[in-house]
Structures are given as C-alpha cells and as structure tokens.
Image: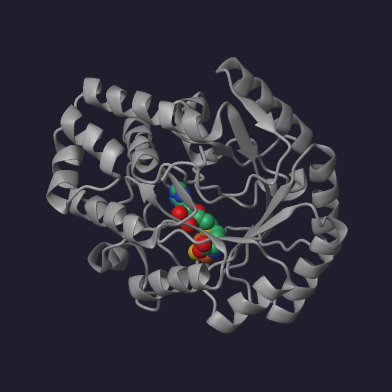
Amino acid sequence: MKKLIDKLHQEQILSAEEFRTLLTDRSEETDLYARELADQVRQQVYGNQIYVRGLIEFTNYCKNDCYYCGIRRSNRNAQRYRLTEEDILACCKEGYELGFRTFVLQGGEDGYYTDEKLTALIRKIKEVYPDCALTLSIGEKSEESYRAYKEAGADRYLLRHETAREEHYRKLHPEEMSCENRKNCLRTLKKLGYQTGAGFMVGSPYQTIDDLVEDFLFLKELDPEMVGIGPFISHQDTPFHDEKSGTLEDTLFYLALLRLMLPNVLLPATTALGTICPKGRELGVKSGANVVMPNLSPVSVRKKYMLYDGKICTGDEAAECRFCLSRRMELIGCQIVTDRGDYKKVLQ
Ligand code: SAM
Ligand code: FES
C-alpha cells in the first residue's frame, strides 16, 4: 500500500486497478502515511500560506432538484431569498476590509439572474475591486453564457462534477440532468480559460469504490486548477434525509490522494468538513488542503442557505469567521494571507 502511495506521489497517476487497491486495502497507518506526505507536498508548493475565499451565497432559488441538496426546488420548507447588487457589493466591501482578495458568488440555478444582470454585476465588482479575483459557482450554463461572464471579468468557476459515473449520477439527480453535460460544462470552462474547479461529495448515497476510481481518473484527465470535495451530509427535507454522512477519515484520505495526484491544485478544507468534525478544517489542511472559504453572506440569510443539516458558522458575522479561521490556522503553523491566491504550477 505504501508503495502505491509513493507511486502516486512520484508519478502523479495510477491505473484504475491500482486506485481500486489503494481505496480498498486501507489501514489507519497507510491513511496517515498518505496524509503526512500530502502535507509535505502542500508545504513544498504553498509553504505555510493558506488562501482564503470570501463566499457570498447570493441566491437560494434553484431550478434543479438534486436529491441531496437542501435548496432543491421541491423543498417547500426552504425560505427563498435573493441578495440585491447592493447587498452583494456590501459583502465585498466588508470582505475587502478583512483582507479577502477573492470573492466567490455561489447560488442555485436561479433564472432571475439573467446573463445581462450577471455580467453587469461581474463588471461592477471588478470595477470596484480590480485587484480581486472573482469566482462563480452558479451551475450549468451554455458556452455562450460562460464566455459572457469571462469577458465581463470572471476569473474562476466552481462546478463540482459530483460523481463521474453516469450510473451513480442517475441515483443522485433527476432525469433532466446528466453527468455528460456536467463534464462538458467543465471542459468548456477550461477551454475558455477559467481557473476551473471540479469535485465530488464523499460518501454520497450509493457511492461505490468504482465510482471513486472514476472520480480520480476523471479529475486527472480534466486537470482542474481547483478541486472541491467534502462529506455528504443529509438534509431533513430531502429524499436522502435518512442517509449516512460521509466520514472524516475518508475525506482526509481523498484530500491527501488529490494533493499527491495534482500537487499544485487549489484544494479547500470545506465547511462541510468543519461541520462533521470541530477540527475538520485543520485536519484537512494537515492532509493537503490549502484553501479555506469563510462565509461573507449577511447573517440574515445564512440559515436559509442550508444545503445540509447542522451547517456551521450560520450565526457568525464575517469578521468573526475570518478571525476564528486565522487563529485556527495559526495553531497548526499556517497563516492566512491577503492574496488573490491564483493557481501556480510549482511542481511539474
Ligand atoms: N448551483 C451550483 C452548482 O450546482 O454547482 C452551486 C451551488 S451547489 C449547492 C454547491 C455544492 O454543494 C454542490 O456542488 C454539492 O456538491 C454541495 N452540496 C449540496 N448538497 C450537499 C449535501 N447535502 N452535503 C454536502 N454537500 C452538498
Ligand atoms: Fe440547485 Fe442544490 S439543487 S443548488
């Protein structure tokens, strides 16, 4: 097993069969070995610097009905909201003063925000904050729309592929969505020059080792600049309300494998990881993650962007989250930096 971990470290790729073995024949010892190695690779590429992204959850309206997601359109209990341009700019202002140089606009797929409204918003943010990077995370769009956002100034795009195998994808989404379209969107985003983020949920219902093998192989082929993974956590008002959450151990191990396979990748220690374990984000960083994404959304709407039950930090002000994370990172020898935190290719 250690040999396979070393091989992944050196060659940055394994065969499907080797991945299957690596994901199956695990022990506490080999998990730790991978995580320590990944921690070293993170330090080689990014030193002790941790990048922060200010997450602005600007709408929880969504036309999709993903079975796992708390803001799916069928959830009648979700209290829907949209932030105005003014609200969003106020979040950016607060974030900028706290040292954020990347803003992530995330939301459901909300038809209210037409391309016209979105491009105007992107232009405005980039005009006021030319030294900041802007990331979008607003789902599947046409090539034309992605191009319009890019031309308006968007720098990065997060679109988790969720699972790379059609068979598994079908169990997580209704018929109207497809794995192929999601993958094609990611390829388009790369082609258009976005720093692109893909990713999957750890321990989502029906996930098998073969699904995960495909996830790793797909990520290797796509070669994204960012990968977002975090544990699946059930939400009471979804069809998956009784399903088990993904585990801390699995998430940390997969973070480590991702850092070994894509050494330069921007890899967040997610809020979901901090939700299943109080020290989850710190452990994530010590397993190869190098990004944290504190919430900049106004406190008044945070509880409404409930993707899963028990989400942390929904009552805290942006400044509290920012300083809390600084302290947490310092305690593990890392430092949050005021930097756009772009992707850089340090290791070949
Ligand atoms: N609508 C955009 C999209 O589809 O990419 C962005 C918003 S979506 C809520 C962001 C991510 O939340 C999804 O890619 C999914 O992986 C994650 N997510 C949704 N429900 C979750 C759950 N129950 N547990 C953990 N993560 C979840
Ligand atoms: Fe659209 Fe979750 S179903 S954001």
Closer-to-camera residue (241/154): 154
* Residue at left offset 85%, top offset 63%: 127
Vertical comparison of 327 with 300: above or below: above
Closer-to-camera residue (182/218): 218
* Residue at left offset 81%, top offset 57%: 130
Residue 61 percent across, percent down from the top left: 62, 66
Vertical comparison of 156 with 343: above or below: below
Q: In this view of the protein, can residue 315 be seen by the observer?
A: yes
| Residue 107 found in image quarter | bottom right
Closer-to-camera residue (58/31): 31
Along the horizontal axis of the image, is 340 left or right of 176?
Answer: right
Residue 164 percent across, percent down from the top left: 31, 62
* Residue at left offset 22%, top offset 37%: 7
Residue 62 percent across, percent down from the top left: 57, 68
Residue 154 percent across, percent down from the top left: 68, 65
Vertical comparison of 151 with 281: above or below: below
| Residue 218 found in image quarter | bottom left
Vertical comparison of 100 with 41: above or below: below
Along the horizontal axis of the image, is 255 left or right of 319?
Answer: left
Q: In this view of the protein, can residue 70 be seen by the observer?
A: no
**Quadrant of image for the N terminus:** top left
